């Protein structure tokens, strides 16, 4: 997918901010980030790893953790704002009225950006480390504190014939 001139400029500015390594002002943008973008970010998290049976609370918690991580950095905050504007067609109101397919196409359009890769990696670990996801997938959690898997379900293969 080709970038428009506006998208190219936004991405270039975002990358320039990252390369400068500036951190001043992150706290001021954090309030905007936490207030305006949590619903949209939560929906993006769901679009990346959709589990219809998983509680929306899990997605919100992962999005809030993402927001907290992003708000610590001016570079990430600027990149998020640019990415959210790109996703929403430069107005935040548009994202909520897009169909699931349109949202997926919008995410595909920014999948090669550094910000998308950051969100993807953070979401991957956030969703699959969440106890609600473990419950949904039937994972009992870590066995390290119980002596490992050898004595705790290592050979529980009841779905294979003998």
Image: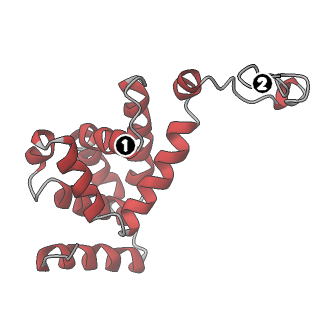
Q: Residue at x 35, y 63 (%)?
A: 111
43 or 12: nearer the eye?
43
**As drawn, 47 above or below 109:** above
Q: Residue at x 21, y 47 (%)?
A: 101
Q: Quick check: can you spot residue 146?
A: yes
Of marks 2 and 1, the one in the foreground: 2
Residue named by callout 2? 157
The 10 Å Cα crowd at callout 2, few under 14, some 14 to 19, many 20 or more, is few
* Rendering coords of residue 134 (x, y %): 59, 27
Q: Quadrant of the C terminus?
A: top right
Mark 1: which secondary structure? Answer: helix
Counting residues from the start of the chain, the first of labels 2 and 1 encountered is 1
Farthest residue toward the front? 161
Instruction: Classify residue 65 as left or right of residue 13.
Output: right
Residue named by callout 1? 45
**As drawn, 102 above or below 117:** above
23 or 98: nearer the eye?
98
Q: Quick check: can you spot residue 72?
A: no
């Amino acid at each position: 997918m080709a970038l428009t001139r506006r998208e190219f400029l936004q991405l270039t500015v975002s990358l320039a901010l990252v390369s400068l390594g500036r951190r001043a002002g992150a706290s001021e943008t954090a309030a905007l980030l936490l207030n305006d973008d949590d619903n949209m970010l939560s929906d993006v998290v769901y679009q990346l790893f959709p589990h219809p049976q998983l509680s929306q609370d899990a997605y919100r918690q992962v999005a809030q953790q993402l927001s907290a991580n992003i708000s610590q950095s001016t570079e990430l905050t600027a990149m998020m704002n640019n990415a959210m504007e790109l996703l929403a067609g430069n107005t935040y109101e548009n994202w909520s009225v897009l169909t699931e397919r349109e949202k997926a196409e919008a995410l595909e359009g920014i999948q090669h950006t550094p910000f998308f890769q950051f969100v993807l990696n953070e979401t991957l670990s956030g969703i699959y480390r969440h106890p609600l996801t473990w419950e949904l997938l039937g994972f009992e959690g870590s066995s390290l504190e119980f002596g490992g898997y050898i004595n705790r379900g290592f050979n529980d293969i009841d779905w294979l014939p003998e």
